[in-house]
Amino acid sequence: MNNKNIVKTTIATCLLAGSVAAHSANILFAHVDDYGAYVDDGNRIAQFLTNAGHTVTTRFLDAAIYSDYSSFDQVFVYDLYAGTDLNANQVQNYNNIGDWYNGLTNQNLILDGRIISSDVTWTNANGMSSEEAWIQNYAQQLALRGGGLVLGTDHYSFQSGINNINDRIGVGQFSGIFGGYPTSQAVVDPLSPLFVSGLDACRADPSTYCINDNSTTGFVATGLQANGDTLTPGAYHGSNIDAWNFAAVSHNMGSITFGTCGGPGQPSCTVQSPSPLMLLLLGLATFGLFRNRFA
């Protein structure tokens, strides 16, 4: 990794470390199934959350019926399992997760149609920087807002199980497939709460920032949903004009870019100010890197 990428990654990690320390969460990372080629990829993504100081419990929704979802601040559901994924345990867990979310006071939601692309195996394959900070920021943004739900999957071969939760909470289903491997990158909205420092510049337009998107990914719902929420593109293909139709990641936390925050009935556009600890960590990281470079 070159010096530029080291600086970007270290700064992002330091910023998140200082912020997460004050907002650690109790997170359930729920695999839809315990069988398939991508269990380890999901476990590595769950480890990103543990690395950020969160308490993470990993479960498989096909193994048993769980009714203690209210004991968690956040639930991440990971569906990278081909097939219908509709055994009795799974169906009841989908319903229970949906009911848990519907009962939350703070119904914060992130949909990720390319979540496996953030695993190190996939970022390395595409020559991109680590996206550990990107995944950690999902948990951070939910923690800042009182908790919530992350639904993550990939293209249509893997969507049939998790889409039962989408239906239960009143948002559009994951759908389709974007191209063939490698589809490369998705542009990130720089004014989204999901944006983090240290992302790679996009190859197509170096003035923009991208996340990895090389797993023949799916599309996520955007716009006004049946439950009354508006889902805003957080990462997408093409320009921001295309974003509503070709979103890889969406959320209901609003963005200045798309006019979905700050208005009547919309979430606040307020950006969290960095804490003194965050600023100290950033300063120390930057000083150390530049001292090593010029020593």
Image (cartoon, helix red, strand yellow):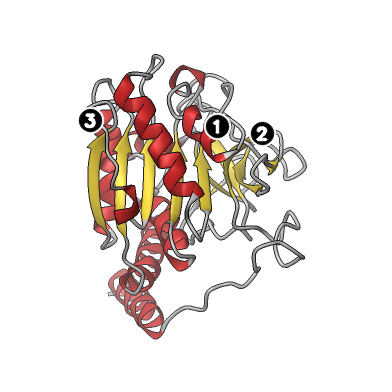
The residue that disc 1 covers is 167
Q: x%, y% of residue 74?
A: 38, 53
Q: CA distance from mark 2 to mark 3?
A: 35 Å
Q: Position of residue 232 (x, y in %)?
A: 65, 48
In the depicted view, which residue is nearer to us: 152 or 28?
Answer: 28
- Residue 174 lies left or right of residue 276; in this view the side is right
The label nearer to you, 2 versus 1, is 1
**Residue behind mark 3:** 64
Image quarter hosting the C terminus: bottom left
Q: Cα distance, mark 2 to mark 1?
A: 20 Å
| Amino acid on which disc 1 is placed | Asp
Can you identify the residue that label 2 sits on?
A: 246
Residue 168 in view: yes
Q: Along the polypeptide, which appears first: circle 3 or circle 1?
A: 3
Task: Residue at 40% x, 47% y: name it.
Answer: 129
- Compared with 28, 173 (above or below) is above
Picture quarter containing residue 137?
A: bottom left
The residue positioned 49% from the left and 53% from the top of the image is 199
Q: Amino acid at mark 3?
A: Ala
Residue 50 in picture, x, y percent from top left: 25, 55
